[in-house]
Amino acid sequence: MSYVKIWLHCVWSTKNRDQIISHSFRPELLKHFRENADEKNIILDYINAHENHVHALINLGKQQNLATIMQYLKGESSFWINSKKILSSQFSWQDDYFAVSVGHSQVERIRNYIKNQDEHHQKMSWEEEVDLFMKKYGFEQIKG
């Protein structure tokens, strides 16, 4: 038997960073993410959303890959939102996403960070958070 713990902190945004994830809609969206993850055997440890983005802590299974998991979470949720006509216009997520590995000793800190998104974004905008991630993790912005 294989034992695997590959923690990933993933972040993705609404298309054009539109602020359309309302407080009233969030619980239903987060519940749907959890149910969909369970159906697809994705270990979604923690998830939360803010007005225009989602943070998730995922424990990657031994036969899973990041691209497939992100497609399952983002693609299926877009389909679900549009099929339920939750919003007045067509919904989609931004194509790109952030994903970084998390050491097991940092899991609780990342859970708390994800949990406190509303408080966090009273002090820092999404754009500032993106800049921080870019610098902190050494990502390079691809201009094209």
Image (cartoon, rainbow, N blue to C red):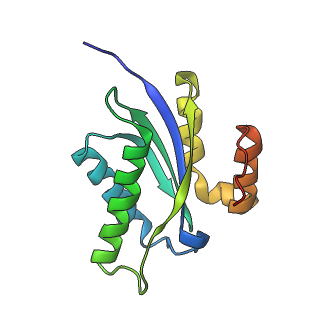
Image quarter (top left, top right, bottom left or bottom right) of the C terminus: bottom right
The image shows residue 79 at horizontal and vertical percentages of: 32, 68
- Which image quadrant is residue 117 in? bottom right
Residue for point 35% across, 72% down: 81
- Could you tell me which residue is drawn at 31 percent across and 29 percent down? 63
Of all residues, the one furthest to the bottom in this rendering is 88
Q: Is residue 36 visible?
A: yes
Location of the N terminus by quadrant is top left
Measured as percent of width and height from the top left, residue 62 is found at 34, 26
Looking at this view, name the residue that lies furthest to the front.
144
**Residue pictured at 58% horizontal, 74% vertical:** 18
- Viewer-side residue, 76 vs 143: 143
Q: Is residue 134 left or right of residue 87?
A: right
Q: In the figure, residue 82 lies in which quadrant?
A: bottom left
Q: Position of residue 30 (x, y in %)?
A: 39, 58
Residue situated in front as seen by the camera: 114 or 58:
58
Q: Residue 68 in the image: x percent, y percent?
A: 37, 45
- The answer to which of 87 and 69 lies nearer the viewer is 69
The residue positioned farthest toward the top in the image shown: 1
| Residue 125 appears in the rendering | no
